[in-house]
Amino acid sequence: MNRFNTVISLIFLLSLSYFADADPLLAVNDEQSINLSPWLYYAQDSKLTQIDEVINLNASLWSRIDSTFNQRLAVDPFWIKISLYNATEHKIRRYLSLANPHIDKINLYHIQPGQAPIHIEMGDSYPFSQRPIAHNNFLYKFDLTPEVLHTFYARIETQGSANLPLSLLSPEQLVKDTETESLYQGLQLGALVAIGLFSLFIALTTHSYSYSYYSGYVLSATLLVATLQGLSFRYIWPNFPLFEPILIPLLIPITLTFALMFSEKVLQLKYHNLRMLRICRYSAATVFCLTLVTPFIHYSVALKINIVAVLITTLLLMVIALTLSLRGHKLARLYTIAWSGMLTGALVTSMMYLGMLHLPIMHQTPIMIGLSFEIIFMAAVLAIRYNDERKAKLKIQQEALKQAQRLRQSKEDALKIEANSNERLEQMVQERTLELEIALRELNEANQKLTEQNTVDSLTGVKNRAAFDKRLLAEGRLSRRQQTPLAVLMIDIDRFKAINDTYGHLAGDHALKIIAQALKQNLRRPSDLVSRFGGEEFAMILPNTSLEGALTVAESMRETVFQLPLSWERNTIPLTISVGLYAEVITDDQDINSLVDRADKALYRAKNDGRNRVCVYTPELEK
């Protein structure tokens, strides 16, 4: 009779649920797991804050939760309800499990006929210790008594996703699901932590920027994944719920920044494409700026901005990798394969968050799967690059070793030759010493002659222009130090071009030699210098000589040249010279150059005044 009454009651309740769709009723049997999401109804009204008001709410105000509602971000607070009925003849224990660890606040009310409502507050806005059961998901344990209707109301407040993956689990299924989830999370996070720490240790030992950025990328991604799975809140900062709405918008741009910097290094953009390098660096700087902005804006807005940043960054790196792959870059091909998983996961997650795609899974699941694939495969890419670098270094070391062996062999051969030659060298040492002394004397004489040749004009036998410049600088500094006058004479052969045109260049060369020797022989002091300045022009340096003394020497030189007998092929050639001079006490290096310039201006005046004369520089020549 009891079984018959139970069946009748169940049929009545099910028919009531059928005709009043807004009052959901789910018959529970011995199934280990039931997805309650299709049975959930919600009501959204900011004025509804008390459970009594919600219980008495008109049925027409309740709506069934669909996939579109589950994909929304930052919805206003809303109520959900579901009624459960034990369809068995015995009491069963069940757990309500909400597998979205990022719900801010959950006010759960358990209503049973004839009993006071049970009220529980949960959410990541409260310390983790406030949860009735220590678990990553939100759990509530209760017993279903036969023929008793259990109704659950929950007020939901969240800034993130409104997805409500609510399920009813038996204790055995809860243990099984927890073990499976822990195994999956342990494998995923364990692999990420191992890869991150391994890369960090390599970066510390090798000082590699690639491994440094990669370790930063992996470790920040690991913390992000742990936060998305609710593990960070449970184990790292259980008593600081304020971190929850900040860390995810903060970790995403940090992870992207490291990803961009690592990609720049592993793809060697510095050597392959400078434009891509600049784009990558500008993108990294832009994404890093998000870490300074997102903590201060609304969580949902920051989350949407980060979703767009993830999508753009992923597409950008994919385009760069594909471009380099088409150009034959070996690592870029592997990088493309690795990043394709991240791109796929990012696209699916972004489309789910933005309401463009509806799937019966958590929003972050695709990107976490893609991220895990990308990081593990990227570790292989980095290992291949490290292996290539190791082989290159090994090859260089082997070449260096071979070179060292060749040098050592050459050294041994040289030592053998030296040992064999020591006796003969000892016998020849005295003879060689004598020959060396003779050779050194001859070499010294040759060096002196060579030095002399380098400073002597090969045609005229007097000093050349280089010797003149060097001597002028030295005598100028001596004049400045001793405050003695220094005179410079600029001498030019009159009508020298006519000699070349009339008698030929050989006659001109002969005239240059005759005049140069005459000027040289008329020098009175060893410190005086005559040199060929260029062409048919000569220059003289008279140290410690006043303007009057220089004028006397110039007139003597002019007279000597005028009286020179020069004949060529039975033709007598008249020779005259024009002389310009200037003398002064040198005060700085600039005065040294002005000596030559002013003497040259005086020479120009002597030529214009009729040649065969001496002209002294005066300030009027500057006009």
Image: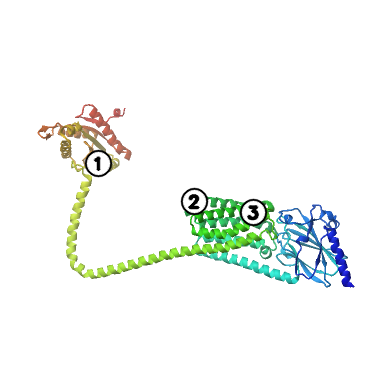
Quadrant (top left, top right, bottom left, bottom right) of the C terminus: top left
Say which amino acid is labelled 3. Ile
Residue 84 in the image: x percent, y percent? 81, 65
User: Could you tell which of marks 1 and 3 lies nearer the N-terminus?
Assistant: 3
Say which amino acid is labelled 2. Leu
User: Could you tell which of marks 1 and 2 lies nearer the N-terminus?
Assistant: 2
Residue tagged by mark 1?
465
Secondary structure at badge 2 equals helix
Number of numbered callouts drawn: 3
In this picture, is 289 found above or below 472?
below
Residue tagged by mark 3?
307
Using the rendered image of the protein, determine whether residue 74 is visible from the camera's viewpoint. yes
Residue tagged by mark 2?
274
Circle 1 or circle 2, nearest the eye: 2
Cα separation, mark 1 vs mark 2, equals: 52 Å
Cα separation, mark 1 vs mark 3, equals: 78 Å
